[in-house]
Image (cartoon, helix red, strand yellow):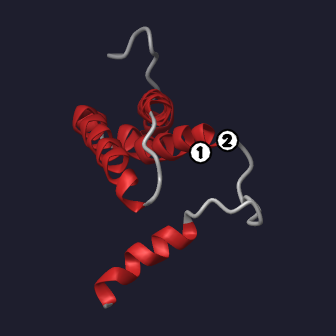
Amino acid sequence: MAHNRPIALYRRANSHSSKRPSGVPGTDKVHHVLAFAILTVPCAALHPKRLFRVVFAAAFYWGVIEVIQPYIGRQGETADVLADLLGVGIGAVFGLLLHIIFKWHIAPRSAGTRRSILCPHR
């Protein structure tokens, strides 16, 4: 029964026991926001032209998670979906800001030129 082992490990890791201390402080919704922001930031920073695909993939991912949860002893919640979307949005904005900072300030310095945000063709 090796094919049931991942499901059993997942159930054990995610069982809500009051005896188990939480390793990361914060609420469940904060964890959702952080997780999806962390997933989205690198994609937005490194591949901003593919951001729509990344956001779509993240939305599909949280949708699958919420649909599967009732089958493994957890509840899918609308608040989780909203927290996931907020995380994707925060991650996308933060990643795009990192991309812009790198593109306009760091990369030109390494090339020996410096662009201005107001006058990029200088």
Q: Nearer the viewer, residue 109 or 102?
A: 102
Rendering coords of residue 71 (x, y %): 35, 58
Pointer 1 and pointer 2: residues touching (CB < 8 Å)? yes
Which residue is at 49% across, 40% downward? 37
Q: How many labels does the image show?
A: 2
Q: Nearer the viewer, residue 97 or 12?
A: 12
Callout 2: SS: loop
Please say if 20 is above or below 39: below
Please say if 8 is above or below 17: below
Rendering coords of residue 17 (x, y %): 68, 63
Residue where numbered disc 2 is placed: 27
Q: Nearer the viewer, residue 94 or 23?
A: 23
In this rendering, position of residue 65 left or right of residue 33: left
Spatial separation of the CA atoms under disc 1 and disc 2:
6 Å
Please say if 81 is above or below 32: above
Which residue appears farthest toward the bottom when viewing the image?
1
Callout 1: SS: helix
Label 1 neighbourhood size at 10 Å, few (<14), some (14-19), many (20+)?
Answer: some
The quadrant of the image that shows the N terminus is bottom left
Residue where numbered disc 1 is placed: 31
Name which residue type carries label 2.
Thr
* Whether residue 30 is visible: yes
Rendering coords of residue 97 (x, y %): 48, 28
* Whether residue 102 is visible: no
Residue 62, labelled with which disc? none
Which residue is at 74% across, 60% downward? 18
